[in-house]
Amino acid sequence: MTNEVAQASAFDPSKLTSAAAQAGDPPYFHRQPSTVTFDFDQGLPDAATYPADLLVRLATETVMEPYALEYSTRGEYMDLSYGNRGLREELANYLNRRDGRPQDPDGIMITHGSAHGLSLIARAYLEPGDAVFLEAATFPFGIRYFESTGATVVPVTLDTDGMRMDDLRKCILEARGKGLRPKLVYVIATHQLPTGAVLSLERRNQLLEMADEFDFMVHEDNVYREHGPGHELPTLLSMDRAGRVFQTDSFAKTVAPAIRIGWVAGTPEAIMPLSKVRQDLGASMWLQRIMVKYLAEGHHEQHIAQIRAIYAQKRKAATQALHDYCSPEITFDEPVGGWYYWLKLSEDVNWPEVQAECMRRGIAMRPGDMFSNDPDQKPYMRLAVGHVEPEVIVDGIRTLGDVLRQVGDRGPTVPSGG
Ligand SMILES: Cc1ncc(COP(=O)(O)O)c(C=O)c1O
């Protein structure tokens, strides 16, 4: 027995892994304070908004429904790849109400959260020789999925109006010059992660025009849209006339992350290739039934209105505190929606020392370079406030301000190049 165990541990599975699995740690690994007092690290909803009582009722009412505990409804094999028909119809109704245009339920695939949708788009559409364009700071898992297909991932600059279309055009032409095929533009168009940018209407139009001009597809990641006034702009999906747009979305950032039900919406023709690369036997039938009832009873729109007000309050507290306590060392564009502050760090401050002191004081934030494959994103930190109480937001930012003063008082210790 002892021998068997010793032999088993002598084998090193990492020698046999694929190139994709050798790509380094997943993007959420970074140093954390040993005791976290001010947790601005992960992008999470406010747990007080989770509609737990309602979910208990819906779970109880749906568990006895026919096939709720099966892989699929008997004979309905599309349940396994596209998801439950009832949920796809309810979601299509929801998108119709939201966007004021018809959505075909066969152009919807139910996934395990929106990140799963992203991975299916990457697998179905990308291969070596393709170029994918994304905002220079973006969802780190997106970068990983796209890179793991062997496609070339190209960062495009962004400002408060979102991805810059002049830079996108330049990057597309450069990629074509290198023999790459521009295949996909991935944008978090509304309340972007991590910058809070909202892609302007003008740029939305330009992006779709460029998609026709250069024959690429557009992936609109929509998970933060409902978190602020950016929801008044039309989605790229609703503006799409050519059938080039996928929209990934989920209930994770509105209802609760543990509702691992997401979806990809587009045309039936664009969604069909995703079903060919999907072999996971589908999303939970029970959870899907729960969300059918949740939508059908009209809870979603009500809930969204409530969370919008809550997150607006948190942003107000954070914006004021950052101006009061962290200026001029930290500058930022005030986000109109979402949970994130993309903090630009002054070059006059010794940031490694600030980071070390933040660790000691229990302030957790995320380093900017985790959101990018572009080295220029280094002098940023991301502060997430969605799950933090307004008083704690203010206390934490005040403490960050104290750290800035304390480190600044020791004089400049950054090598000045001289
Ligand atoms: C921009 C963005 N897209 C997608 C996701 C994944 O969300 P889901 O829980 O729907 O898979 C996240 C989660 O942090 C995100 O920030």
Image: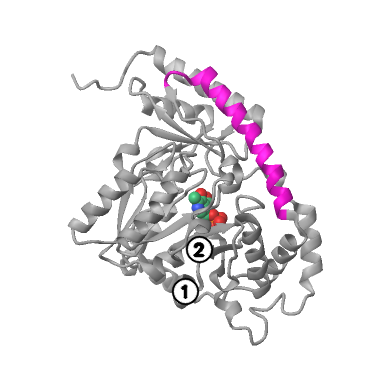
- Magenta span of residues: 300-329
Helix, strand, or loop for circle 1? helix
Residue depicted at 49% across the width and 54% down the height:
236
* Picture quadrant of residue 418: top left
The Cα atoms of the two marked residues, 2 and 1, are separated by 19 Å
On the image, the x and y values in percent for residue 232 come to 58, 45
| The residue at label 2 has a CB less than 8 Å from ligand 1 | yes
Q: Which residue is mark 2?
A: 116
Q: Which residue is mark 1?
A: 269
Of residues 401 and 223, the one nearer the viewer is: 223
Of residues 178 and 339, the one nearer the viewer is: 178
Say few, some or many: other residues with alpha carbon within 10 Å of mark 1 (under 14 / 14 to 19 / 20 or more): few
Left or right: where does residue 252 sit relative to residue 279?
right
Q: Is residue 101 magenta?
A: no
Please state which amino acid type lies under the numbered disc 2: His
Left or right: where does residue 54 sit relative to residue 107?
right
* Picture quadrant of residue 180: bottom left
